[in-house]
Amino acid sequence: MRIGELSARVGASERALRYYEQQGLLRPARTDAGHRDYSEEDERTVRRIQTLLAAGLGTSVIAELLPCTPDEGGIVAPACAELVDDLRAERDRIDAAIAELARARDLLDAIIAAAPPAGAPACA
Amino acid sequence: MRIGELSARVGASERALRYYEQQGLLRPARTDAGHRDYSEEDERTVRRIQTLLAAGLGTSVIAELLPCTPDEGGIVAPACAELVDDLRAERDRIDAAIAELARARDLLDAIIAAAPPAGAPACA
DNA sequence: CTTGACCTTGACGTCGACGTCAAGGATACG
DNA sequence: CGTATCCTTGACGTCGACGTCAAGGTCAAG
């Protein structure tokens, strides 16, 4: 599929898809005319990229761990020791981030719960 | 307390504390000489700011909701309807972010689990 | 009084994941 | 054949929470 269709499928901009390729996260095939031709595995890769980016990982880290991702039913390549240490650190960072997010959500809920019942008074 | 001590206490840079004030999140007292003089409530406010910033809220939103935060034992001011809508949206966004983070963590755990047991082979 | 730690207000720099033009080639359709 | 839509590669802009200088005032200790 071409970049427009993939963009619509995964909800990423075409710019983002080209950026991922530029950062070495993706290597789509090319047509004779130079147009990108994405496979369905590329699509799955993009979804993983989105998840990892949303988790705060940088593109360089993602580039290293993508060849190690579990690929439908089988773990492909285990990573080297140094990378695994990085991943553990990222995992811990994510756990901490989840805890912080939960605290922020509870704070917001407390404020929302304290809001006026229905007909709210005017506000600046 | 002065900015240096507060900085050390809450783990924020002095630059960050001045920035919070500049954005209207904080209004510390001043000494005759113009030095900032933070109260202990300012310290609690900074901790809330840190939590909300970590949750992805912008300083402008935080500025609006800070006067509404539950202040030791009592909810102070409920927010106006429009703000409450924003807060609900932020809360939902945080929930979604937590879900994404959990997925990323599981992905990382799968990769880590697939790593070589102990003596790892060399790696690029 | 002087030194040095601490404080003040600017103001420009940073970083990363894109957004957004510009200036064209490729493809599909009637 | 035209043309409308998609695609290509640059390359500069953005945005937000600060980092990082610069050029000084303030204050306690010796």
Image (cartoon, coloured by chain):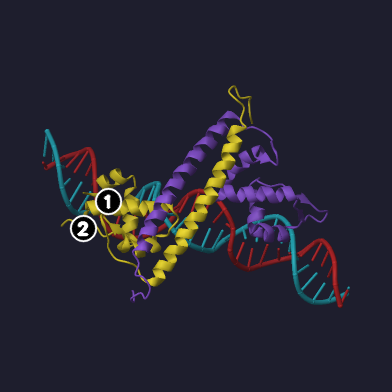
Chain colours: A yellow, B purple, C cyan, D red
Q: Residue furthest top?
A: A119
Cα distance in 3D space between marks 1 and 2: 13 Å
Number of numbered discs present?
Answer: 2
Instruction: Tell me the residue at 63%/29% (across/down).
Output: A123
Image height check: is A34 above or below B120?
above
Residues A58 and B94: in front is B94
Quadrant location, the C terminus of chain B? bottom left
Residue C16 in which image quadrant: bottom left
Q: Is residue A49 left or right of residue B76?
A: left
Residue B35: x, y in percent?
A: 77, 56
Please, what is the three-letter code of the amino acid marked with disc 2?
Answer: Ala
Q: Chain of mark 1?
A: A
Instruction: Tell me the residue at 64%/51% (across/down).
Output: B47
Residue A100: x, y in percent?
A: 54, 50
**Same chain for the residues under marks 1 and 2 in the image:** yes
Residues A108 and D27: in front is A108
Q: Is residue B85 left or right of residue A8?
A: right
Q: Which residue in the structure is indicated by mark 1? A: A43
Instruction: Tell me the residue at 30%/54% (across/down).
Output: A45
Residue C8: x, y in percent?
A: 73, 57
Q: Chain of mark 2?
A: A
Please, what is the three-letter code of the amino acid marked with disc 1?
Answer: Glu
The kind of secondary structure element at disc 2 is strand
Q: Which residue in the structure is indicated by mark 2? A: A29
Residues B104 and B52: in front is B104
Residue A108 in which image quadrant: top right
